[in-house]
Image: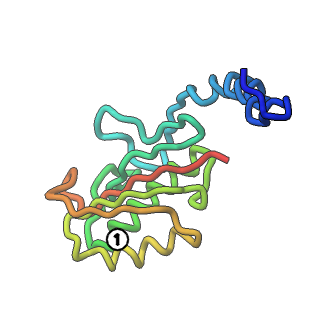
Amino acid sequence: FVMMMDGRRPWFLAALPAVWLLRRALRPWLRARAVVSTSNAPAAIGPYSQAVKAGGLVFVSGQIPLDPKTGQLVAGSIEAQARRSLENLKAIVEASGCTMRDVVKCTILLADIADFAKVNEVYSEFFAEPFPARAAFAVKSLPKGALIEIECVAALL
């Protein structure tokens, strides 16, 4: 039992029961997982979900530039592939109940890091300030020979 010199309990000890009750009340919500799926984005091409809601966040799987109607890779420039990947990402984010403004983190995988500036131009069409945190990496290869793959995390509000 902790007491201050004047005999009162510190404020943080008084708040502990409320914090414990809040954690207990939120525990089922924080542990709950829900799969997000939409026909407006390509179906998963492996043993994974398009997205998963968990702990107040939406984790969107990496999107390559597949046309959701045909399942075929969009041919053409890095700009066309980036746009298709971001449209797929947006469809999944919106299916989760979020918007692109709720995205807090993106990861971009590029077959050629020299395409970074071109991807930035397309990326800026989908995101506004305050921009999400982001990382971009060059990788040796991507599924189906894609030039780009993009994943994100969005916050459920």
User: Which one is nearer the viewer's eye here, 22 or 3?
Assistant: 3
Residue at point 47%, 62% (across, down): 133
Q: Which residue is mark 1?
A: 80
Q: Nearer the viewer, residue 146 or 3?
A: 3
The amino acid type of the residue labelled 1 equals Ala
Between residues 153 and 73, which one lies in front from this camera angle?
Answer: 153
In the rendered structure, the answer to whether residue 147 lies left or right of residue 33 reads: left
Q: How many marks?
A: 1
Q: Residue 60's x, y, as percent? A: 45, 46
Residue at 72 percent of width and 30 percent of height:
19
Residue 103 at x, y = what percent? 54, 56
Mark 1: which secondary structure?
helix
In x, y percent, where is residue 57? 55, 42
For image coordinates 35% across by 73% down, the residue present is: 119
Q: Is residue 114 left or right of residue 49?
A: left
Residue 75 falls left or right of residue 18: left
**Up-down: is 3 above or below 44?**
above
Q: Position of residue 42 (x, y in %)?
A: 39, 47
* Quadrant location, the N terminus: top right
In the figure, 83 relative to 22: above or below?
below
Please tell me how crowded label 1 is: few (under 14), some (14-19), or many (20+) other residues with Cα within 10 Å.
Answer: some
Q: Judge by depth and name the residue closer to the eye, 20 or 95.
A: 20
